[in-house]
Amino acid sequence: MPRGHAVAEGDRSGAPAEEGPAVGRNRTTGERARYWQPAALPGVDLLHARYLHKSFSRHTHESFVFAAITEGVEAFHYGSDLVHAGPGQIALVNPDTPHTGHAGVPEGWTYRTIYPDPELIRSIADDTLALRGDVGFTQPVVDDPYAARLVVAVHRAAEEGNALAADSLLRLVTARLLRSHGGRVASAAPRAAGARDAARARAVLEERMADPPTLERLAAELGTSPFALLRAFRTAYGMPPHTWLTDARVRRARRLLDAGLPPAEAAVAVGFTDQPHLNRHFTRSVGVPPGAYQRGKSR
């Protein structure tokens, strides 16, 4: 591993190392964020941001999340717990796991985040640890300064266009995190009596995302009561149906933006009333507006 890629993160100003059209800045708050997909790491997204007043709504990712904190403290709800991550620590989020995010100290937080595809993580687990099947992480925050430096090094290699170093370092940090903080994860079996109703409700919302039914009508279609469905859905998916629907719309909008659809058209396609409506919810889940996200993915 090249020595220069393992240097601890400085980030004194909180500014991303590269400026460009995909860097979002708020001159009033001093917040900055760059969300991008580097050519050096196909299929892997990166986020380098400094947030002071940012508040992420409860949301999920289809990918894993490795977020190395370089300054300040991030606080986030993970399940029923409120956890904190500071310098030298990494926030680890498994796919489809509801979580939030906000500043844990008045000065906010700066971090570098990697969003690796689940299939990549599974292949690394199989290749290095002989772990097959569903793998994941057992703790939302780990204190591992060396792994945090590796996350920073992945970013820096990608910024330099060094594909060999970026790919090598990503595999090194993933193997280290899996070995120390991960393993096989079993799919949770439905425990509640209403789990089937929750799954059917989710299928209806996915199919009718642009014009969803009310909770009362949805419950009637499924032959249950609104309150019973609300409780079952929250138990199964960690959030109520309306919150899940907003998250699902953002996730689908991301796929449409990846395919090149303009943000205004993506907003209507997934059921948001207009582009500002998409902008608001997209930024609260992804960290940057859809336009900046799309530019970062196309570079």
Image (cartoon, grey):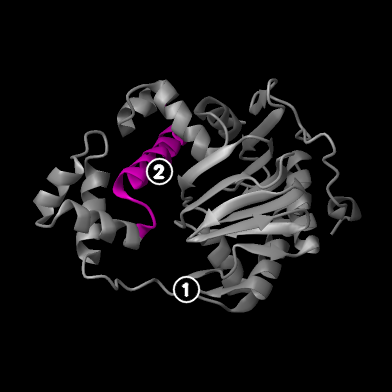
Q: Is residue 100 visible?
A: yes
In the image, residue 123 lies at what x, y percent? 56, 66
Is residue 231 shown left or right of residue 6? left
In the image, residue 245 lies at what x, y percent? 33, 43
In the image, residue 89 lies at what x, y percent? 73, 59
Identity of the residue drawn at 55% across and 77% down: 131
Identity of the residue drawn at 20% across and 45% down: 215
Give the magenta-colored segment's residue range: 237-262
Q: Is residue 257 magenta?
A: yes
Q: Splitting the image into 4 quarters, where does residue 272 fall?
A: top left
Q: Which residue is mark 1?
A: 133
Q: CA distance from mark 1 to mark 2?
A: 26 Å
Circle 1 or circle 2, nearest the eye? 2
Q: Amino acid at mark 2?
A: Asp
Residue sticking out furthest to the right: 3
Identity of the residue drawn at 69% across and 31% down: 32
Q: Amino acid at mark 1?
A: Gly
Q: Which residue is mark 2?
A: 247
What secondary structure do most residues of the magenta stretch adopt?
helix
Please count the marks in the image.
Answer: 2
Q: Is residue 262 visible?
A: no
In the image, residue 270 lies at what x, y percent? 32, 33
Callout 1 touching callout 2 (CB < 8 Å): no
The answer to whether residue 120 is above or below residue 221 is below
Q: Is residue 37 magenta?
A: no
- Check disc 2 and report its element: helix, strand or loop: helix
> Residue 123 versus residue 239: which sits nearer the camera?
239
Q: Quadrant of the C terminus?
A: top right
| Circle nearer the N terminus (1, 2) | 1
Identity of the residue drawn at 62% across and 36% down: 35
